[in-house]
Image (tube, rainbow, N blue to C red):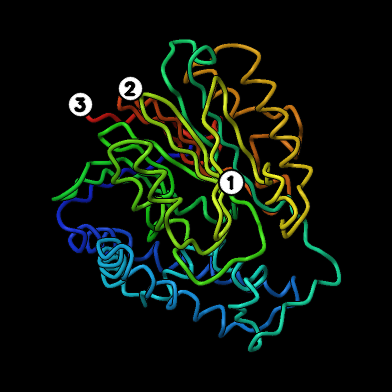
Amino acid sequence: MPLLQLRTIVLAGTPAQMGRAHGEALGEDIRAFADQRLRAAKVYLRERGIRDEAAFGDLGRRCLEQLKLWDRDGWDEHHAVAAGAGIAADLLYTACNLTDLRDVITLPDDRQSVVGHGRKPHAPRHAPPAEAEGCSAMLVTGAASASGEVIAGQTWDLNPPDLDFVVAFDRQPAAGPRAFTVTCAGCPSLIGLNEHGVALGTTNIKVRGARVGIPYLSLLHRALRARTREEAAAVISGADRAAAHTYWIADAAGALDLECTADRSVRRDADGALFRTNHCLVGDHQRLEGEPPSASSLARLARVDGALNAQPHSVETIKRLMADRSDGVDSVNRFAEDNQGTSTNACVIAVPARRELHACRGSADRGEWIRLTFA
């Protein structure tokens, strides 16, 4: 089977110019991506007994209004993407930020419930599998790194149909740092590295208290303009976030992660290896989790823990860890044919000191790895 290819598209100019170029280059893909994402959202909500699709559709508009006040450049770029692709801006924003916006409906802040004018969603008769999504983040510093350099990366695991829409961008803004990003067609940045050597990414968690606010992709997109990991962490921790996620941030001097609910952020700094999957590690957050930790999330965390602490690591050994299938359907490397409702759709590894990003579309052993540098 031929290896999956990862497209790289150059975007340059003002936010509006970059957005227009993005939308025009990928218009057909963007419309198809939004269509399949919104179908997936409908299934997800109905599995949880929610049929108020109008309320869900309105969330994109309301969060987009918040974005305009918080990050006008991001708002301008998003609207230009939508215009270039010929799709409504609020519909696209809803599709892009699916994981956060569905949490606003299924795990709401009671003061902002959007389902049925304040009624809480009822639990489904048969709960859907929690394994149906993922991501495994792995960061090494100091003695955990074979070269002594910070190395940070992750798998990105979500809906198998998203694989068709994964793309890399070489972002060359008229103002602000150049950056390489990996995301889906039509979306803000998901994982990336900027020319200052700031790298970042995310894993999903589900915690009650989600609300109308700034969704995760817009947080990452804005944080990628930072000059240091401290500045990027302040952008994310200080924002009025819509929902829970974890965020990892690295630069040449170190690495950290943030376990965030909509209104609380807890930081861990790397001392050797730092890793994360899809359940909360903070006690106060665990008590508010919307679903118990899945077998997949627990198994992946244990696998990454054991691997990262067994030996010093390099880019190549982390690629091998990302390709690991030792735990079958609960492995770090997730295949669509596992029938878990998810797949590994991209893998990314950053070496901030070298200003170097390694990335592939699909899982680590099915995608062709590319190396992006600022030289």
What's the mark number on residue 375?
Answer: 3
In the rendered image, residue 370, in percent from the top left (x then y), is placed at 38, 31
What's the mark number on residue 362?
Answer: none
Q: Is 164 drawn above or below residue 256 in the view shown?
A: below
In the rendered image, residue 104, in percent from the top left (x then y), is placed at 59, 70
The front one of 223 and 172 is 223
Check the picture and name the quadrant holding the C terminus.
top left
* Image-based side of 188 in relation to 99, left or right: left
Secondary structure of the residue carrying numbered label 3: loop
Q: CA distance from mark 2 to mark 1?
A: 27 Å
Q: Residue furthest bottom?
A: 117
| Mark 1 nearby-residue class (10 Å; few <14, some 14–19, many ≥20) | many
- Residue corresponding to mark 2: 353
Snapshot quadrant of residue 116 = bottom right
Residue type (three-letter) at the residue carrying disc 2: Ala
Tell whether label 1 touches label 2 (CB within 8 Å): no
Residue type (three-letter) at the residue carrying disc 1: Asp
Tell whether label 1 touches label 3 (CB within 8 Å): no
Residue type (three-letter) at the residue carrying disc 3: Ala
Residue at 71%, 42% (x, y): give it: 297
Task: State whether residue 299 appears in this view.
Answer: yes
Secondary structure of the residue carrying numbered label 2: helix
